[in-house]
Image: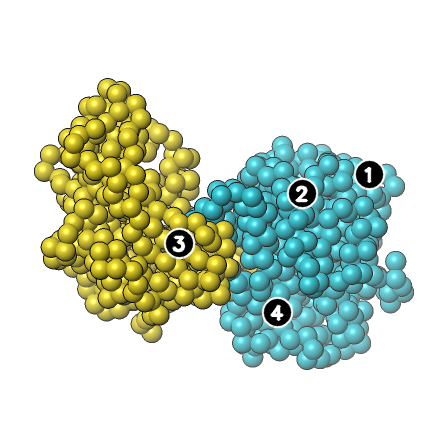
Chain colours: A yellow, B cyan
Amino acid sequence: MSDDVPARALQLRSLVTDQATIQVSLESVDVPVPGPDQVLIRMEAAPLNPSDLGLLFGGADLSNAAAAGTVDLPVITAPLPPAAARAARARVGKSLPVGNEGAGTVVATGSSDAAQRLLGKTVAVAGGEMYAQYRCIGAAACLVLPDGVDAIAGAASFVNPMTVLGMVETMRDEGHTALIHTAAASNLGQMLNRVCIEDEIPLVCIVRSPAQVKLLTDQGARHVLDSTAESFMDGLTAAIAETSATIAFDAVGGGLLASRILTCMEAALSAGSPFSRYGSAVHKQVYIYGSLDRSPTELTRSYGLAWGVGGWLLTPFLIKAGPARSAAMRERVARGLTTTFASSYAGRLSFVEALQPEAVAAYASMATGTKYLIIPNGGAAAGAAS
Amino acid sequence: MSDDVPARALQLRSLVTDQATIQVSLESVDVPVPGPDQVLIRMEAAPLNPSDLGLLFGGADLSNAAAAGTVDLPVITAPLPPAAARAARARVGKSLPVGNEGAGTVVATGSSDAAQRLLGKTVAVAGGEMYAQYRCIGAAACLVLPDGVDAIAGAASFVNPMTVLGMVETMRDEGHTALIHTAAASNLGQMLNRVCIEDEIPLVCIVRSPAQVKLLTDQGARHVLDSTAESFMDGLTAAIAETSATIAFDAVGGGLLASRILTCMEAALSAGSPFSRYGSAVHKQVYIYGSLDRSPTELTRSYGLAWGVGGWLLTPFLIKAGPARSAAMRERVARGLTTTFASSYAGRLSFVEALQPEAVAAYASMATGTKYLIIPNGGAAAGAAS
């Protein structure tokens, strides 16, 4: 191992205590020595994705977040509401590393050829525990970033891009030809819009403000509906009639949105058809992949019996898709990292900055345009907006 | 056509008016002359299934049902609550025949061999419009009842038996090995219990009273849970842990029951496993096939992302299963009509009796033990309990 690699380094951790509070802190841990097929990556950038925030804060009430710890090793604490505490029972007392994905430079490798070939390369990786100054991982998990793509641009090479492609592939696998997306002005939503334009897939975007309608329309989206508008249901029904979109991916989860989508699908499908007591025979599907609204999903079931609502997660999809198809998806992502699959960030945060209450309030809001990058080895200067 | 067959006969009809009321009445209609491949059946018995009641009364408020018409041709009217009126918009002004299935004697046939071979036979049929004194239908739709099975015993040869077998086949198709059933003390639920005992499939029954627990336990059911008991969730979790039931068929639909089942599946699956932020990877499925509770389905989504909830209906299942498999299912039903697939009824009603408010109150309650048979050609004497 190179002399530059320290024996110990920092890792961001999340702990639920038996007092129903969350503690997010920095722990000094041993830097691992890579096994024969492993590499050690000095992590240079890791995005704060919504899926990370769930593990990081466990549904805590962040309006009551408090700062603790020291200047160099700050700690954020926040109380868990009863429902969140119940859901977090299995993790009480376990200090969990966080961070689904990131990118950095390979600074040490194991003895295998595959590992040694990566020495000095800038690579993107997924697999958890990425909010760490050093991450040891199998060489096979590394995506070598193409020339001209640095760790900042490659930090989000997996979660959003593969999710977007997974949605499109799921749509095709299940026999649909168009799709609906909610929270569609998100980084992921904008990416999905670019992929659908490239692949000529009709996309119906659902957003929550006129400003978001404009944002997506300016990026070439043809069907963008504001769910807060009075004409929402009529507009959505018309867009479904035009596109034949019978599958939706929903990041909101709670409330009536999924049910409204199914209602509009049914209205679009049954328009002009004779009365059928069991509703249209065409299967209508909503997959919930996020939980921006944590309240229960309410289904009015006013859309016949040919419908389904379910959870959707990338990993099981990739397992089902198999290695060849997953590899083809990855290659497409690698080719488009600075174009189709580019992410944009509101700013960059060092570990210390990420553990300040004001920063937490900004990135944990999950509002459009509040996505941040963590720079695990960055000092305070890393805080400038990108 | 035989001289015994009248030129006109009665048919039961349901009409939603533009005043948001339902009218159930008897209409005198022409008795059809069978085409070459058709037969004319004098209908002797037709069950009032929950699926018929939905079409018959369209969600009307039957506590305000009123009698109208004449002694010989009574009419039932009832107001539709706003949500039911909205759902029934497509059928306003259309007088709809009702009755999914029934049995009777073939009294006339078309010219084909297949049709003529059925003359004089007692047959069971499905296909709608069965609450009629005469029903003309394709010869291929007829199930000739085995010796010793009369029209009363064969009246319910399709909907419940094929639904029960369809559930078991769906369970197998989707890779599950045990199942959960709600409203499990129903005629259908008792039948499913007998099939599961025959096929050695672990079944978890959910009912709504201690009396129903006893009813099913007396019939050999091993896992019967009362959803009104305080220990329900713990008992259900234990039963799922023992049986590995990861698919449920739910006749209730509304409220939290489907979500509770998923919660207990997840608790049973994740017991003893390390914490996983996305929940257990095993797919958990609830199919809603009825709507005893018409309120919205509420999903708390506290069971990871490997779950699905959807509508389930027999007809699309049979289409997917294909003719050979459907025929094999039908043959199994025919062999067991007086045993495994027997139905029991609270009583028999002539057309005139079925249109009395007291009778409607009894059969439309859909409570366990209130299933009735309609005897389309029966006089008042047919009213004795069977």
Residue for badge 2: B242
Residue for badge 1: B146
**Residue B316 in the image: above or below residue B253:** above
Determine whether, in the image, residue B281 is placed left or right of residue B356. left
Whichever of labels 2 and 1 marks the residue nearer the N terminus, that label is 1
Which residue is pictured at 66% across the width and 42% down the height?
Answer: B243
Whether marks 4 and 3 lie on the same chain:
no
Which of A358 and B69 lies nearest the eye of the viewer?
Answer: A358
Whichever of labels 4 and 2 marks the residue nearer the N terminus, that label is 4
Q: CA distance from mark 3 to mark 2?
A: 33 Å
Q: Disc 3: which chain?
A: A
Residue for badge 4: B59
Q: Nearer the viewer, mark 4 or mark 1?
A: 4
Q: Disc 2: which chain?
A: B
Which residue is pictured at 29% across the width and 46% down the height?
Answer: A28
Q: CA distance from mark 2 to mark 1?
A: 39 Å
10 Å neighbourhood of mark 1: few (<14), some, or many (≥20)? some
Determine whether, in the image, residue A204 is placed left or right of residue B224. left
Q: Which mark is residue A238?
A: none
Q: Disc 4: which chain?
A: B
**Residue A17 in the image: above or below residue A196:** below
Residue for badge 3: A15
Q: CA distance from mark 1 to mark 3?
A: 68 Å
Whether marks 4 and 2 lie on the same chain:
yes
Determine whether, in the image, residue A57 is placed left or right of residue B286. left
Residue type, mark 2 in image: Glu
Q: Nearer the viewer, mark 4 or mark 3?
A: 3
- Residue A200 shows up from this direction: no
- Mark 4 in CB contact with mark 3 (< 8 angstroms): no
Whether marks 4 and 1 lie on the same chain:
yes
Residue A234 in which image quadrant: bottom left
Describe the element under mark 3 as helix, strand or loop. strand
